[in-house]
Amino acid sequence: VLLDFSASWCGPCKQMKPHLKELQTAYGDRLKIVEIDVDERGHLSNHFHVSGIPHLILLKDGMIVNNDVGGRGYSALVRFVAVACGEP
C-alpha cells in the first residue's frame, strides 16, 4: 500500500498525480495507492508524523518499508516502490 499524503493546493502533489496513476496501472493488483488529503485527514497525518507534502509512505504487511517527502517523477516512484516488491 502506498499512502500519498497531499493537498488540493499543493503544486508538487498535482504534478505527481499522473505519475501515480501510471504507477498504479503498471503495478496493478500488486500495489494499492491511497490518497490522503492532509487538510481533511489531519489525524492520519499526525499518526504517520507527516510534516511536509507530498509525503509518500509505503507499507508492506502493515509495516513501513519506505518513507519520503517531496515530489518525484515516474522513474523515481518506481524505484521508491521497488523496495517492497522485491525488485532491484
Image: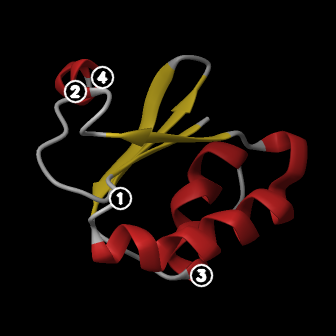
The outermost residue toward the left is 51
Three-letter amino acid code at disc 4?
Leu
Q: Are marks 4 and 2 in contact (CB under 8 Å)?
A: yes
The Cα–Cα distance between marks 4 and 3, rounded to whole angstroms, is: 27 Å
Q: Which quadrant: the N terminus?
A: top right
Are the residues flagged by discs 3 and 1 in contact, CB closer than 8 Å? no
> In the visual, does 62 lie left or right of 84?
left
Which is closer to the viewer, label 4 or label 1?
1
Q: What amino acid type should be assigned to the residue bearing mark 3?
A: Ser
Q: Is residue 62 above or below residue 53?
A: above
**Position of residue 17 measured from the top left corner of the image (x, y, whole percent):** 55, 68
Q: Residue 42 bears which disc, if any? A: 2
Which residue is situated farthest in the right direction here?
Answer: 29
The mark nearer the N terminus, 3 or 1, is: 1
Q: Secondary structure at mark 4?
A: helix
Q: Which residue is mark 3?
A: 75
Q: The C terminus appears in which quarter of the rendering?
A: bottom right
- Residue at screen point 27% across, 64% down: 9
Q: CA distance from mark 4 to mark 2?
A: 5 Å
Q: Which residue is mark 4?
A: 44
Few, some or many C-alpha atoms within 10 Å of disc 1 (few <14, some 14-19, many ≥20)? few
State the image coordinates of residue 87 (x, y, percent, origin top left). 72, 58
Give above or below for 11 relative to 42.
Answer: below
Q: Secondary structure at mark 1?
A: loop
* Identity of the residue drawn at 74% across and 43% down: 31
Q: Secondary structure at mark 2?
A: helix
